[in-house]
Image (cartoon, helix red, strand yellow):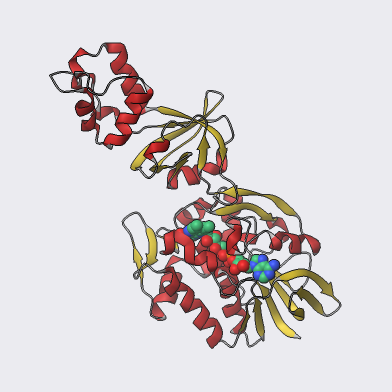
Amino acid sequence: MTDVLIIGAGPAGLAAGIAWAKTNRSVCILERNSTAGKKLLLSGSGQCNVTHRGTAEEFLQHYGSSAKGNFVKPCYLAFDNAALKQFFAERGVPLLEREDGKVFPKSLKAEDLLNVLLKEFKKSGGTLQTETLVRHVRKTPDGFEAETDGGRFRSQKLVIAAGGQSYPATGSQGDGFRFAAALGHRIVPPKPALSPVIVQNYPFGNCAGISLSGVPVHLFRSGSPVKKSCGDVLFTHRGLSGPVILDMSRSIEPGDILSVQMASPDKLPETLFTGRKTLKNVLLCSGLPEKLLLQLLDILRIPPEWPAAETNRAIRRKIIQHLTAFPFAAARTGDWNQAMATSGGVALGEVHRQTMASRLVSGLYFCGEVLDVDGGTGGYNIHFALSSGMIHRSR
Ligand SMILES: Cc1cc2nc3c(=O)[nH]c(=O)nc-3n(C[C@H](O)[C@H](O)[C@H](O)COP(=O)(O)OP(=O)(O)OC[C@H]3O[C@@H](n4cnc5c(N)ncnc54)[C@H](O)[C@@H]3O)c2cc1C
């Protein structure tokens, strides 16, 4: 019988493994894949945005609601962004804070962070059992039993760190929710989060890959404002993505309008439309990429080579209006294969926030994305995965 059995070798499971192994308990992590941390390796386009600059107060605002921020608080305070930086730097992987506050390994290799976690876990005496798919878990009189492809594993304590449901090819396919439910926990229905938005009759498919930075975006529902934000927007083949859209996706419903200010009104005074320049050349002063401008003129059926001075007021207004508030009608947010995180999961009211221990089942713990916690873009999810695993250390 192992002291602690952990399901999942993502950042949360590895951090919990390190924490538990330091308490001189025998620890075994069961991982379905042949290697650990498949999703971590994909994170931040392989560079891993592991945390973010900010005070505790600022940091905790990125979990969707003050109740969620409150739940995350003890984990965060026990392993904050400074502690996280120190943890990796002391193990030979210094981190780098970008101007926008996002923190990455200096090497820009997610692999380096994963190797620190694996090495530390191994050094602490833990065992990682890969290619071991856990099929069922159950409570026994003296602990837990996990049924796997490779036989049954028994333990005194069980940590569910099986992640959420997004990017299922990485191994997190919602099994953690099933295990928690089987042990009596309530699951807040999982939904894709941090997801791109598919746009109805999207006219910018040929502009896929173009990104605009620092763009104000307003979200409207039935004509009323719902939310506004500002950040980078990426045009995709079927709609919009980029940090500001991913963060907003939590609030977006089919039929909502995303009004995107591609160009600032200051850069487009009506007086610009004078002289002998063509419309296209005049509009290039807005700083927008030519391909995007040509597509916009095409949508409005306005020839780009028209002399700007010959356009009438109605046409100028139409162009300015579309450039400063282009209305994209949301068809839906992306599915599990496109979402970077999962909202929903193990209901927080049934988990002690100081320890991540179940309030219902003695000896049962959770950490990471299996919990009903999802952060915004910027390193908040991996930070939570690590800190919610690390908090097991002191208990
Ligand atoms: C493309 C992409 C980019 C991202 N970029 C960032 C970023 O830059 N910054 C950031 O903060 N967040 C990012 N995220 C989110 C972040 O990666 C996750 O929130 C984080 O990995 C969650 O950690 P976790 O350990 O809880 O779960 P996971 O990393 O999903 O790990 C869970 C592990 O459990 C294993 N498992 C599941 N079920 C079983 C089972 N039945 N038996 C055995 N093993 C099982 C899985 O194989 C997996 O290895 C990104 C996500 C994606 C998809």
Residue 70, position as x, y percentages in the image:
59, 56
Report the residue at 22% width, 22% height from top. Answer: 305
Q: Is residue 30 left or right of residue 64?
A: right
Where is residue 78 drawn, in percent x and y? Answer: 53, 70
Residue 242 coordinates in the image, percent (x, y): 43, 46
The residue nearer to you, when weighing 359 against 109, is: 109
Spot occupied by residue 314 in the image (x, y as percentages of width and height): 31, 12
Is residue 175 shown above or below 310? below
Give the position of the N terminus as an image quadrant.
bottom right
- Residue 391 visible? The answer is no
x 26%, y 24%: residue: 304
Left or right: where 81 falls relative to 349: left
Q: Is residue 189 left or right of residue 240?
A: right
Q: Quadrant of ligand 1?
A: bottom right
Residue 90 visible in this rendered orientation of the protein: yes
Give the answer, above or below, for where 13 lies relative to 340: below
Quadrant where the C terminus lies? Answer: bottom right
User: In the image as oriented, which residue stretches furthest toward the left?
Assistant: 276
Q: Is residue 156 left or right of residue 202?
A: right
Residue at position x 36%, y 21% from top?
A: 300
Dividing the picture into quadrants, the one containing residue 122 is bottom right
Q: Where is 149 relative to 377, above or below?
A: below
Q: Nearer the viewer, residue 318 or 369?
A: 318
Name the residue nearer the viewer: 380 or 305: 305
* Furthest residue toward right: 141
Q: Tag count in the figure?
A: 0
